[in-house]
Image (cartoon, rainbow, N blue to C red):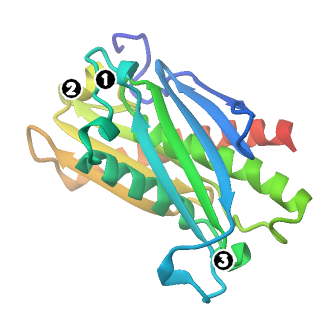
Amino acid sequence: MRPDGRKETELRPVIITPSYVKYAEGSVLIEVGDTRVICAAKLEDRVPQFLRNSGRGWITAEYGMLPSSSPVRIPREAARGKIGGRTHEIQRLIGRSLRAIADLDALKEKTVWIDCDVIQADGGTRTASITGAYVALMEAVYRWMKQGSVERNPIKDQVAAVSVGIVEGEILLDLNSAEDGHAEVDMNFVMTGSGKFVEIQGTAEKAPFTKEALDRMAEIAQKGIQELLAVQKRVLTRTQ
């Protein structure tokens, strides 16, 4: 039993509140335990230079943590004058995860911006951002199709993400901040609704791990992602 009472393979409570931001075409507040992230989608009528005159669209993301989202104040990156390496990495991960399930030709030289803002962090902010961003994107797609901004649905599959780690020799699903800080192995899995891997990020923080442990972590991650996919479906069924 873990400090918060969960079993080893149990997710934290997940709540996704749709239509959370007034001026975004699609938006959610995703709560995973004590981690809370606002994800919002907006459509821009242009694409990056490398896609101009290609007939293809683009999906990209920005990610940030509010200064008070952590027990220790996080200085705003704008005030520092540059974006940190961790932020760059997470932004690119969110963008890749959403592009993996998209038909970019259907966007026709439009860019979808996904903004993920962490308002409270207790571990798993990048995985919560991906899971919430999918719902915000789909809510926006429904609106764009009704408005005629997008002719057909560019999203071909679901996508969600979860963390798995080894803490004191035990494989645990969906680590909170305290568990993450003591993890011997820390991994993030991004998977589609059809069960395919989009990305696997794994690090032996304190000790190397075996292939058997990797296989077991992937199995546990897939179980957790299936539960997250079900939450996404329930939310989107209510918003259509």
Which residue is rendered at x = 70% and y = 72% of the image? 107
- CA gap between label 2 and label 1 equals 6 Å
In this rendering, would 130 be left or right of 91? right
Q: Position of residue 134 (x, y in %)?
A: 62, 49
Residue at mark 3 = 109
Q: Is label 2 in a helix, a strand or a loop?
A: helix
Say which of marks 3 and 2 sits in front.
3
Q: Is residue 179 above or below residue 201?
A: above
- From the image, which quarter does the C terminus lie in? top right
Disc 2 residue type (three-letter): Gly
For disc 2, the neighbor class at 10 Å (few under 14, some 14 to 19, many from 20) is few
| Nearest the eye: 53 or 29 | 53
Q: Residues within 10 Å of mark 3 (few under 14, many from 20)?
A: many
| 14 lies left or right of 106 | left
Q: Position of residue 201 (x, y in %)?
A: 30, 53
Kindly identify the residue that appears in the image at 30 percent across and 36 percent down.
79
Seen in the picture, residue 44 relative to 133 is either above or below; the reply is below
Question: Where is mark 2, residue-wise?
Answer: 181
Question: Pointers 2 and 1 in contact (CB under 8 A)?
Answer: yes
Mark nearer the N terminus (3 vs 2): 3
Q: CA distance from mark 3 to mark 2?
A: 42 Å
| Disc assigned to residue 177 | 1
Q: Earlier in the sequence, mark 1 or mark 3?
A: 3
Q: Amino acid at mark 3?
A: Glu
